[in-house]
Image (cartoon, rainbow, N blue to C red):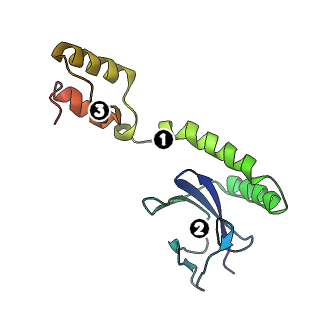
Amino acid sequence: MLGSFHPLSFGFVVLLVYSTYGSIFDNGRPLPTSHSGACAAYGPWQVGMSFFLVDAESEFTLELSLSQQSEQDLRRQLAKLQEGGDAGTLSRRLAAELSRLVPEMLDWDVKRPTKAQIAYARSICYQRKIELPEQAMESRQAMHLFIASRGRWP
């Protein structure tokens, strides 16, 4: 039997949880699925995969390999929600934890610039009498390129 996906929204990122409860939903509406587990709105899913992080904007899906104990704990929480629990509370807690963890788990080049990078870039801007480009503030990699060019931003 095909399990179900329960969406918990975090802005443009949606965490879909595969479980054995109910059917596949999109904002509470059942979605068409095939016997192979393919879902018209989200693509093919393999039975047995447990938890997914989905970015609907870029249509990218990442399987999350949680410990067996964490999966069991989360499934108990989902069962409680299906019995009338407050999904908003869980959604807010998950969003808060993801917001706290995201900066730490990103690859170095996509993380926000360090305070040292920003200070050095500002000193370059002061010396050259230029503004610090907003694009340089987007990531460590972008800031590195700005610093390496000594303020000669493309």
Image position, residue 15 (x, y; %): 59, 57
Determine the residue located farthest toward the right in the rendered image. 83
Q: Name the mark on residue 142.
A: none
The residue that disc 3 covers is 136
Using the image, determine if residue 11 lies above or below residue 49.
above
Determine the residue located farthest toward the bottom in the rendered image. 35
| Picture residue at 61% right of the left edge, 71% below the top | 48
Q: What is the C-alpha distance between the residues marked 3 and 2?
A: 39 Å
The residue that disc 2 covers is 49
Neighbour tally class for label 1: few under 14, some 14-19, many 20 plus, Cα within 10 Å: few
Q: Is residue 22 left or right of residue 65?
A: right
Neighbour tally class for label 2: few under 14, some 14-19, many 20 plus, Cα within 10 Å: few
Q: What's the amino acid at mark 2?
A: Met
State the image quarter where residue 97 is shown. Answer: top right
State the image quarter where residue 140 is shown. Answer: top left
Q: Is residue 139 left or right of residue 40?
A: left
Q: Is residue 112 left or right of residue 98?
A: left
State the image quarter where residue 148 is shown. Answer: top left
- Disc on the earlier residue, 3 or 2: 2
Q: Is residue 125 left or right of residue 68?
A: left
- Label 3 sits on a secondary structure element that is helix
Q: What's the amino acid at mark 3?
A: Ala
The residue that disc 1 covers is 105
